[in-house]
Every structure is written in C-alpha cells, then in structure tokens.
Image (spheres, grey):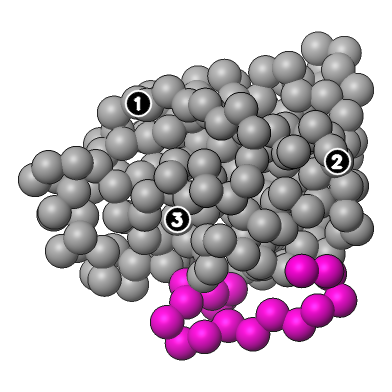
Amino acid sequence: MRPHEPFVWGEDMAGPRAHPVFATLYDALTGPVERRLARDLRRQLLRGCEGHLLDLGAGTGANLPVLREVRDAGTRLEIDAVEPDPFMLRRARRRAAELGLDARFHQAPAEALPFADGTFDVVVSTLVLCTVGDLGRSLGEISRVLRPGGTFRFLEHVREGGAAGRWQDRLRPLWAAVAGGCQLNRRTGEAIRQAGFLDVRWDTRPAPFPVARLLIGSARRA
C-alpha cells in the first residue's frame, strides 16, 4: 500500500477512534508496570538504535524519555512518531517538548503510514500491534517504510498458552472496550514471521495478567 491510498476502517476493527478518557488515565494506569518492568524493556529494545527512526503508535510518548537517553549518549537519531488517537498524540507532543527532544508527530494509523517507501532505518513498535485494526496490513506498512536491511524492533504482548490464554479469549471483548481497543489474545509473533521479515527473533517475558506474556525482539526487512 502507498501513502496516498485510502484506508477505510471497518466496524470490526480496533480503529483510530479517539479515546479522551483512556488517554487522560493511561499514564496513571500504566505507571506501576512502566516503572517496574516496561521502562527497562524499552531501554533494552531501543539500545543501539541509530539513524532515522519511526516510533509507531507513540501513544502518550512512553518511548521518548528513552530515546532522549539514546540521543544524549551521542547517537545520531532523527525521530518521527505516528499515533492515530489525537488525545494521545497531544500528550506525546507535550512530553517531547518537556524533554527538549526534537521529533515530528503525525496523526495516522499503522495501516496507512504517510511516508515514502524505504524512509526509515528503524521502526519501533511498543505495545502497539495489539490495537491495530488490520495486523497484516500494518506489518506490510512497516516493511514498506523500512529501507532494505532496515530493522523492525518490537515489544508486544501476545496470547498466552493454556488456561491463561483461554481466559484472555474470554476477556478480550471487555478488555478491548475499556483499554482503547487492545486485543489480549493476538498471536503477533507468528504474524511477524509470516509477514516476510528476515532474521525474526525474540525473547519472552512474563507480565501481570491479563497481559501475561511479552515478546521483545527484532526482525529485518528483506
């Protein structure tokens, strides 16, 4: 898909609806997990990033403090960020200003990225692919905007096995309704493998239920 092609959200998709209440509460709700677990995983994920980077689904800007650490370490870094929710995007812009971090922000869904082919050296996705309306199309866009050999780095939660996974299946509709469209039971790792990336690798980490399981990994555009 090219940036000029329209993308129409279906009623069954977790699309770019605005969630003003969720955006307002997001940082407070996720703060304990962010401090105990996610911030260190973000550092691990973003370590060594260099060049032109896309922060996909930037949310309220949780990656931005870590990206400033990377930049302050002397790494050459040019940052674009996309986020479909205008209320989340507003908070991310404010956080970047507070951090003194130069970044360009764009309101757009992952399925229709407003960039030319091969724009980025790195695309970063952190707890984003659980909310996109069309996972396959989003992964195709990630591949498209990466330069050949560019790196896709991801930190995503996925369906757990056994009884925990069955509970995630049951809870998914309610969780999606209160958590901005988040889908608890996606098999995101398998989808990344099937999307044509090379050198797909990840480690897993436990997380508090109902999220239960995180993948942290990377892949390379063919």
Disc nearest the viewer among 2 and 3 = 2
| Residue 213 visible to the viewer | yes
Looking at the picture, how far across and down is residue 137, in whole percent?
62, 64
Per the image, the residue denoted by label 1 is 205
In the picture, the quarter occupied by the C terminus is top right
In the picture, the quarter occupied by the N terminus is bottom right
Q: Which mark is residue 130?
A: 3
Per the image, the residue denoted by label 2 is 147
Q: Which segment is the magenta one?
A: 1-21
* Three-letter amino acid code at the position of disc 3: Cys
The residue sitting at 85% across, 41% down in the picture is 147
| Residue neighbourhood size for the residue with mark 2, other residues' Cα within 10 Å, grouped as few (<14), some (14–19), many (≥20) | some
* Three-letter amino acid code at the position of disc 2: Arg
Residue closer to the observer: 209 or 140? 140
The residue sitting at 37% across, 50% down in the picture is 187
Residue 110 figure quarter:
bottom right
Q: Secondary structure at mark 2?
A: strand
Q: Which mark is residue 174?
A: none
Residues at badges 3 and 1 in contact (C-beta under 8 Å)? no
Secondary structure that dominates the magenta span:
loop
From the viewer's perspective, is residue 158 above or below residue 112? above
Q: CA distance from mark 2 to mark 1?
A: 29 Å
| Residue neighbourhood size for the residue with mark 3, other residues' Cα within 10 Å, grouped as few (<14), some (14–19), many (≥20) | many
User: In terms of sequence position, does the residue under pointer 2 or pointer 1 come before the other?
Assistant: 2
